[in-house]
Image: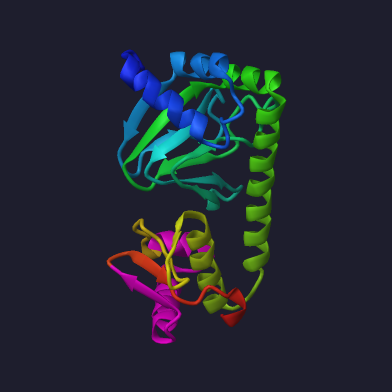
Amino acid sequence: MIIKNKSDYDYYAEKLRQHPEFSPLDDKFVGQLIDEMKIKKYHRGQILFDQGDTRDKFYFLIDGVAKSFHWDKDGEEQLYLYIRPNKGFPYIGLFEDDQYAYTVETMTDVKIAEFSMPIYEEILRENPELMVNAVKEMSQIINTSETQLQRMVTTSAKCRVANAILFIGQQIGDLQEDDSILVPYPITIVELSKVSGTTRETTSQMVQKLIAENKIQYNRKYFKILETDEDEY
């Protein structure tokens, strides 16, 4: 869908202005983005772009959740991070890369705003405050990835699975009034095994142990993290 009628135009323009990543833009640049923005919907399990594809689009996730990952030299999927609503991507490779450095796959049905990458980068160049926001986003992505790598340097399967659950919860979970974290999206044991780097069987066993210890709840593929202090695992 390309924005045509005024009510839709005003709605998405206001949405962009409210979001920290785009809030520094004045009406001219908001209009420039909206004029060529496309709104698309994808079903769960669809690929938005593949590692190595031409890096020609910038995306903003409106509804749903997606994950980004890359393939290592052995053809194994290596998780990069999860993308929740109201987040833009990709930031890695701005102004430099001609190809996407990773693959993005939808984990639920999603609604996404799509922009031309050259236009987005041009607007970044002309808006220093927006550029600062983009740099902050890149720094956060790098910090999240480094933290996850550090957490996974352990021979304990239980710790790896617990850390993977915390990693998911911190990225796409919602903090509850009792300080627990609810992940409002289905996470399969297979998905969790990819994040933790353990087999499906081991992951399932460790999840059952964590449930028995009252550290998590897992019901119909939905996680609730009861113990949020990683040192307690």
Q: Is residue 138 above or below residue 30?
A: below
**Magenta-drawn stretch, dominant element (helix, strand or loop):** helix
Residue 58 is situated, as x and y percent measured from the top left of the image, at 53, 27
Q: In which quadrant is the N terminus drawn?
A: top left
- Residue 208 painted magenta: yes
Residue 3 is situated, as x and y percent measured from the top left of the image, at 36, 17
Residue 81 is situated, as x and y percent measured from the top left of the image, at 54, 50
Q: In which quadrant is the C terminus drawn?
A: bottom right
Q: Is residue 40 above or below residue 210?
A: above
Q: Is residue 231 above or below residue 70?
A: below
Q: Nearer the viewer, residue 117 or 134?
A: 134
For the point 59% across and 48% down, the residue is: 72
Q: Nearer the viewer, residue 160 or 128?
A: 128
Is residue 111 toward the left or the right of residue 25 in the image?
Answer: left
Specify start and end residues of the magenta stretch as a single range: 190-219
Residue 25 is situated, as x and y percent measured from the top left of the image, at 59, 24
Task: Classify residue 101 by image quadrant.
Answer: top right
Q: Is residue 11 above or below residue 70?
A: above
Q: Nearer the viewer, residue 39 or 74?
A: 39
